[in-house]
C-alpha cells in the first residue's frame, strides 16, 4: 500500500486473562480415610488488536474472546486391611464448557491485485469466508 505512513511503534494491542479457581473439601468424620474435593474454574482471555496496524502489517485483524468453565470432583479413599496391606482407590470427573468468539477484519483480495479500500468483516467462526472474497470462484 503505497503512500501509507504508519509508525509500528505506536501499535496498541492488549490481552487480558483471568483464571480464578475455587475448591471445596468435603470430609465425613465417620470415614476419615475418604476425601471428596469439589472444584470450579472459570478462565477468560480477551485479545484486542490494533485494528488499523494489524490490517496494514498482516492483512487481517481479529479479536479473540475465549472462556472456559470447568467443574469437577475427585474422590480419594483408602481401606486398611491389616498392617501390611492397604487398598486405595480414587475417581476424578470433570465437566468443561468452552466458548469462543473470534470475529475477523480482512482486506479483500482478488486476482487483479486491486488496492483494498476498506476491510471486510467476517463474524466469529466464518474463517472459510475470511480466506476468499470472490464468490464466483469454485
Image (tube, rainbow, N blue to C red):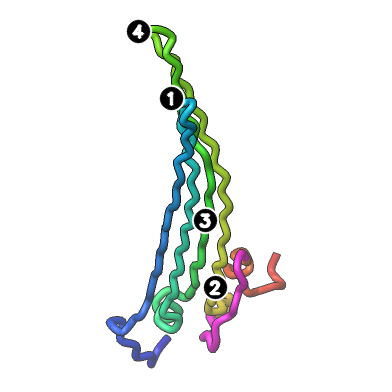
Say if the magenta span includes residue 122: yes
Bin the neighbour count of mark 3 within 10 Å (Cα to Cα): few under 14, some 14-19, many 20 and up: some
Q: Quadrant of the C terminus?
A: bottom right
The CA span between labels 4 and 2 is: 65 Å
- Please provide the residue range marked out in magenta: 113-125
The CA span between labels 4 and 3 is: 45 Å
Q: Residue 31's spot in the image, x, y percent?
A: 48, 25
Res. 104 mark:
2
Q: Residue 123's spot in the image, x, y percent?
A: 62, 72
Q: Disc 2 vs disc 3: which is toward the camera?
A: 3
Q: Residue 22's spot in the image, x, y percent?
A: 44, 52
Res. 33 mark:
1
Q: Disc 3 vs disc 1: which is toward the camera?
A: 1
Q: Residue 93's spot in the image, x, y percent?
A: 54, 37
Q: Earlier in the sequence, mark 3 or mark 1?
A: 1
Q: What residue sits right under mark 4 in the picture?
A: 83
Amino acid at each position: 500500500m503505497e503512500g501509507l505512513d504508519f509508525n509500528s511503534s505506536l501499535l496498541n494491542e492488549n490481552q487480558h486473562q483471568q483464571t480464578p479457581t475455587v475448591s471445596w473439601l468435603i470430609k465425613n468424620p465417620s470415614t476419615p480415610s475418604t476425601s471428596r474435593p469439589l472444584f470450579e474454574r472459570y478462565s477468560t482471555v480477551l485479545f484486542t488488536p490494533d485494528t488499523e496496524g494489524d490490517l496494514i502489517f498482516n492483512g487481517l485483524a481479529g479479536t479473540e474472546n475465549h472462556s472456559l468453565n470447568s467443574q469437577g470432583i475427585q474422590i480419594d479413599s483408602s481401606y486398611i486391611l491389616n498392617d501390611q496391606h492397604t487398598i486405595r482407590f480414587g475417581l476424578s470427573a470433570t465437566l468443561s464448557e468452552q466458548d469462543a468468539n473470534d470475529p475477523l477484519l480482512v482486506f479483500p483480495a482478488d486476482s487483479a491485485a486491486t488496492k483494498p479500500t476498506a476491510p471486510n468483516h467476517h463474524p466469529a467462526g466464518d474463517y472459510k469466508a475470511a480466506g476468499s472474497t470472490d464468490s464466483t470462484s469454485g
